[in-house]
Amino acid sequence: MKEIIKKKIAVLGSTGSVGTQTLDVIKNHSDAFQPVILAANNNIDLLIRQALEFQPHTVIVANKKKYPQLQQALQHTNISTLAGTEDLIASIESTEIDVVVNAITGYAGLKPTIAAVKSRKKLAIANKESLVVAGEIIMTLADAHNTEILPVDSEHSAIFQCLRGNKHTEVDKIILTASGGPFRKFTAPQLATVTKHDALKHPNWSMGAKITVDSATMMNKGLEMIEAKSLFRSAAKNVQILIHPQSIVHSLVQFRDASILAQLSAPDMRLPVLYALAYPDRIQTNINRLDLLQCGSLTFEKPDLNLFPCLELAFCAAKDGGNMPCALNAANETAVEAFLNDKIKFTEISKITERVMAGTTFIQSPSLTDLDATDRQARILATQYV
Ligand code: NDP
């Protein structure tokens, strides 16, 4: 009988929203995929449960204080346990892996992204912050090492699918859709009083706290525009953002002959995850089918840049380039954390980010060391403004 070769998957950020959905996909397609590495940061109880269920070769906890608990729980198994980002990077480099899923949140995902790209591991990237901060460096390294990068963000997966089989030179523009978040219909005075509980109630998607707040400020769409610019090598001016409250059309590409291609499905992150894991194939799945007769009207509107200044800030950072997207990202991460800890109001997230960008020394072609310094400095500034 012919042996079925399963793809070996590393799931970084396995305890988070994308990470747990990735493991769900792997479980539902256990004939096709097997996890070989699981990595997370703080949620040690869930990481241990995942390790016992999925039996990967290696489990890594980034927060070293949590290591004794991990080691004790898994000492009677064949699973190797490691701790810290250096061990995570060494494991990515030395393990036989078919696809690395980077579902770590924030700037912490950058070094694992670089490690996967440099060691020629196919990278399914959910961690958009890597591409926002260092898109140019990552894409240049991917070219040099011949590493494939597959987007997991549903919008970028949609664009990737629309571009498949088409020439990049024939693209007129990329149209990124946005749900508009929970405050789409709010007025400025209403926005000034929203709480974190309001911001954490996304109308269509269940996601981690940071990206949910980013969706409410629309910074998420700004980050995605910069991500698209890097991934698809497009100028920011050729990326249009449209509000599409139903989250059914995940994004579109318009070509020079005036044709528009789009990708549609019910909103479910397991679909772009499955697409990235199975690529270049499409495999049979029990994910809910979209019933076009039931989904009602599909509508599109222009975003309100006055109400959502984070979007404008992201366009400024993209236009300036260099280390500005890095400063934008670090300021936003710091401000969102402060908002989630009840230290600042919702509307202060954009104000702090704008002040940090204004206080950042511009570097046209930053190295990774420059970006580390920009990230550190922007966080210091943002913390002062909190
Ligand atoms: P979550 O906050 O739910 O999960 C983040 C994960 O990253 C957790 O497993 C966390 O571990 C882990 N983590 C954090 N820091 C480290 C570190 N230093 N080393 C290793 N692991 C770490 O986030 P989401 O799943 O929502 O988002 C993840 C990424 O995917 C983000 O970049 C987001 O923008 C992007 N994305 C998310 C979507 C979604 O639907 N959620 C959709 C599209 C993109 P622990 O829990 O143990 O602390």
Image: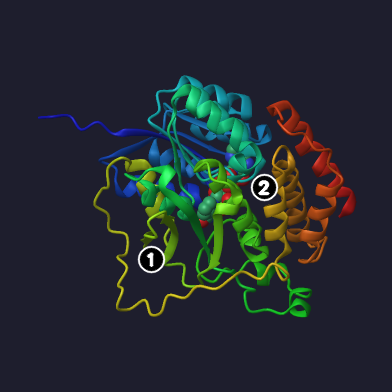
The residue to which callout 2 is attached is 318
Three-letter amino acid code at disc 2? Ala
Residue at x 42%, y 75% (from the top left corner): 298
The answer to whether 102 is drawn above or below residue 382 in the figure is above
Q: Residues within 10 Å of mark 1 (few under 14, many from 20)?
A: some
The quarter of the displayed image where residue 10 is located: top left
Quadrant assignment for the N terminus: top left
Dot placed on the residue nearer the N-terminal end, 2 or 1? 1
Disc 2 + disc 1, Cβ < 8 Å: no
The quarter of the displayed image where residue 376 is located: top right
Instruction: Decide which of 339, 237 is in the foreground and name it.
Output: 237
Instruction: Decide which of 108, 237 is in the foreground and name it.
Output: 237
The residue to which callout 1 is attached is 266
The answer to whether 361 is drawn above or below residue 121 in the figure is below
Residue at x 63%, y 66% (from the top left corner): 200
Coordinates of residue 188 in the picture (x, y in percent) = 76, 76
Mark 2 Cβ and ligand 1 under 8 Å apart: no
Q: Is residue 213 left or right of residue 48?
A: right
Three-letter amino acid code at disc 1? Ala
Q: Secondary structure at mark 1?
A: loop
Coordinates of residue 353 in the picture (x, y in percent) = 79, 53
Coordinates of residue 126 in the picture (x, y in percent) = 51, 46
The residue mark sitting in front, 2 or 1, is 2
